[in-house]
Image: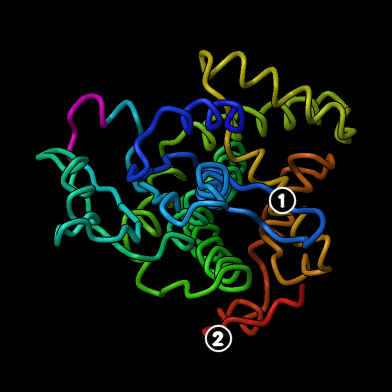
Amino acid sequence: FLPPLLRTVKQVVHPSCRGVSLIKGMDFDSSTKSPILISQAIEKAMSDELSVTRNFSCGVLMGANVANEVAQGQICESTLASNFKDIDDLDMNEQTRRIFDSPSLRVQHVHDVAGAEACGALKNVIALGAGFIDGLDDLGSNTKAALMRVGLLEMIKFCKLFFEDVKDYTFLESCGMADLITTCYGGRNRKCAEAYARARVKDGQAGNDQWESKQCDEQWRHIEDELLNGQKLQGTLACKEAYLVLSSRNMLNGFPLIRAIHEISFQGAHIEHIVDGIRVSGKERQPRHRREKIIQ
């Protein structure tokens, strides 16, 4: 829906207009085998290559703010990530932050757009794994805590591999660790993943413990229609995109949790396989503090 919408918006907005995306996802560029941030796609679509005055800038708003709780006025936080240029000595990052900030929605600002936005997409993938754990009655809070910890490490590793200048502090903002926590306990992706897990477990007890990819896709569509009342799952799409990026570069072994979540979600692997994504060696768990060079 985005490309045609942006073409329409571009025709009517003022040249000095700036944007803030709340979309939590990413695309995959098959030619470069790299992830593409939605904010980058928006900037490209809204900018005019022939005009230096029309260089559109897009930030993102990400954080631990489940929509229905925000609507109820419950206290929560969010992170605005942007790099807007000052206008007439006005700090446009601060001016934009104040638009969203309120007594019940506390908004902090960072400059790390890539880190904040990638977190918003990847935490939905990890939340699928949390839902799988919730769908297995013999696993509990300890296992989910382990999954969230390993998941955060894989999020950090993915961000630093594929995006430049990602900052460590971003992962301690609302868009990072906080959003991961709330999504793994209260989001729609966790909820639907639990339903998916229970359906798989029930089918396994009936003797059909091996699903084909087509069955997996059909089950996700059924759950989405039944539980989300018109909303769409974001974690399944982000999972496919992240898997495409990693598999195209032969990097799946470095991301055992994301790999396990994809294999359960779309390749028919048993739900119990989720623990294999957590049980990795101590050496493999250590995040790389230095961004690895990605060869295009």
Residue 54, horizontal then vertical, whole percent: 44, 49
Answer yes or no: is residue 67 visible: yes
Amino acid, disc 2: Arg
* Residue lying at the far left of the rendered structure: 103
Residue 216, horizontal then vertical, whole percent: 79, 31
Answer yes or no: is residue 139 visible: no
Q: Is residue 36 left or right of residue 107?
A: right
Which residue is at a point 9% across and 40% down the rendered structure image? 103
The structure's colour scheme is rainbow
* Helix, strand or loop: magenta stretch: loop
Q: Which residue is mark 1?
A: 28
Residue 218, horizontal then vertical, whole percent: 78, 22
Which residue is at a point 84% across and 42% down the rendered structure image? 267
Query: In the displayed structure, would residue 220 be above or below residue 104?
Result: above
Label drawn at residue 81: none
Query: In the displayed structure, would residue 295 be above or below residue 31?
Result: below
- Where does the C terminus fall, quadrant-wise? bottom right
Q: Secondary structure at mark 1?
A: strand
Query: In the displayed structure, would residue 14 be above or below residue 199?
Result: below
Q: Which residue is mark 2?
A: 290
Query: In the displayed structure, would residue 201 be above or below residue 41?
Result: above
Dot 1 alpha-carbon crowd within 10 angstroms: few under 14, some 14 to 19, many 20 or more: some
Which residue is at a point 72% across and 43% down the rendered structure image? 271
Q: CA distance from mark 1 to mark 2?
A: 24 Å
Amino acid, disc 1: Phe
Magenta residues (range): 70-75
Q: Secondary structure at mark 2?
A: loop
Most foreground residue, 197 or 289:
289
- Total of numbered circles in the picture? 2
Dot 2 alpha-carbon crowd within 10 angstroms: few under 14, some 14 to 19, many 20 or more: few
Residue 234, horizontal then vertical, whole percent: 57, 36
- Where does the N terminus fall, quadrant-wise? top right
